[in-house]
Amino acid sequence: MSLLIKGGTVVTADDEFRADVYCENGKIVAVGENLDVPGGAEVVDAGGQYVMPGGIDPHTHMQLPFMGTVASEDFYSGTAAAMAGGTTMIIDFVIPSPQQRLMEAYETWRGWAQKASADYSFHVAVTWWDETVHEDMGTLVRDHGVNSFKHFMAYKNAIMADDEILYNSFSRALELGAIPTVHAENGELVFQLQKKLIAEGITGPEGHPLSRPPEAEGEAANRAIRLAQVIGTPLYVVHVSAIQALEEITRARGEGYRVFGEVLAGHLMIDDSVYRHEDWDVAAAHVMSPPFRAKEHQAALWKGLQSGNLQTTATDHCCFCADQKAMGRDDFSKIPNGTGGVEDRMAVLWSQGVGKGRLTPSEFVAVTSANAAKIFNIYPRKGSVAVGADADIVVWDPAATKTISAKTHHQKVDYNIFEGMEVTGLPSHTISQGKVTYKEGDLRAVEGAGNYVNRPNFAPYYAAMEKRNELNKPTAVKRG
């Protein structure tokens, strides 16, 4: 099958130029002006539009069993909604239960993901530690293309990783050439604050941000970064929501350490006033962790993205409908944590980023696809418009407009955190594996069409890191 995208302006993370893009058998095989291509190719007219790499959302949770229920979005509906918004790949999370073998959990998630309509990959969480975890991490890296491991520093008495787990897992990741990632919140502090607030009679959604203050995120980010520095491994901090965490990442990067920061589209747009909404259901719909913050944090996060101290954007797409959120009607700590956004990330970031002069088109490509592809070692296969890359492409109409609404979105959830937001800049076409899967409102996603993407480890870089660590290794003092 062949496809010609004709007459558009190609935008990559590094460049912007007029060119046609020709795709065959799921790959980009030619990029240039006035391409001479074989007859019979499907033609997409991209005149007056941008041709960019399809988005990569590096943080989603499809079909996640969590807090006594299961996320409403499965791998088919979630990846289909993603493509309606211009995202052509997700990196989801395998989250083993404590004491569950990592490989057992991985095989379960791989089974669920067979129905994905777009390409996908997995981070694997380390929620406990013994020699089987050590062994399974090696198997995942060597045989299954996993090069990142997640650590929840929150959710005490469930999946929280303490400092002992962090040390062992970070050290093992360094040996394997994989990158550790962390959800940075002080789980003990959150647990104690939850108990305190509920005892004081604060049981509604307004208690959620009070129990997870910015300081809890800043402390955990600092602790994870310092542990990573001592061990000598790079680190990726997910869903940075607070000035305090951003400052720790900025400080570490200024000291020369390889620390990466991810920010959610929601944290850039929404403030904590949502938790005080008079309608309990609306307030509960926004319960996620870390929570939405006061307005000054949004301004700081935009600056972090503009300065390069935050490198990627994501959604933490984890949907729970109103009846599921109602599980916590009398106790905010029991409201399932999660919101949507995989369909809207690209549009809100373009509208509020490029449209407001905060980002250039090339910077938009960097933070929505290319940087994630580089950090997780799948660039230039993903995140680029270049010969040899996967034909995962979005044709972007900068003049198209819409009002975001749960009534019209494709996401399998009964609310939208961006409800009523007017956006300018939308995909006219989404191309996955060289096939048009979304065209001007017509979603053509095919269940099961998505491919699992192997992500190689970082062996050359880590070999250099280990050599540096060995050179700096302390020696014992010989005494008489």
Image (cartoon, rainbow, N blue to C red):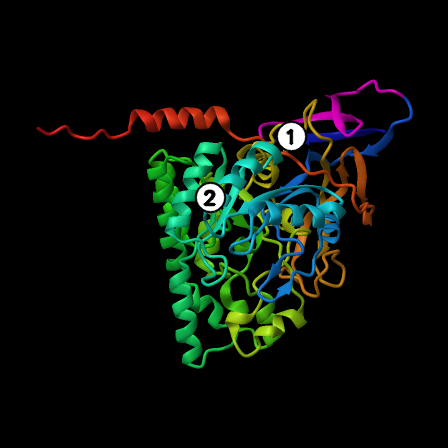
> Which of these two is toward me, 435 or 169?
169
Q: Amino acid at mark 2?
A: Glu
Residue at left offset 76%, top offset 34%: 433
- In this rendering, the label closer to the viewer, 2 or 1: 2
Quadrant containing the N terminus is top right
Residue at left offset 74%, top offset 57%: 409
Which quadrant of the figure has residue 438? Answer: top right
Can you identify the residue that label 1 sits on?
384
Q: Secondary structure at mark 1?
A: loop
Q: Is residue 230 magenta?
A: no
> Does residue 92 appear in this view?
no
Residue 179 x, y percent position in the rendering: 48, 38
Residue at left offset 48%, top offset 32%: 177
* Residue range of the region highlighted in magenta in the rendering: 13-38
Can you identify the residue that label 2 sits on?
131
Question: Residue extending furthest left?
Answer: 480
> Does residue 444 appear in this view?
yes
Quadrant containing the C terminus is top left
Q: In the rendered view, tell whether residue 251 sits above or below residue 331.
A: above
Question: Residue extending furthest bottom?
Answer: 201
Residue 418 x, y percent position in the rendering: 63, 59
Q: Secondary structure at mark 2?
A: helix
Q: In the rendered view, tell whether residue 192 sits above or below residue 350.
A: below
Q: Is residue 31 magenta?
A: yes
Question: Residue extending furthest right?
Answer: 40
Mark 2 to mark 1 CA distance (whole Å) = 39 Å
Tell which circle, 2 or 1, labels the residue nearer the N-terminal end. Answer: 2
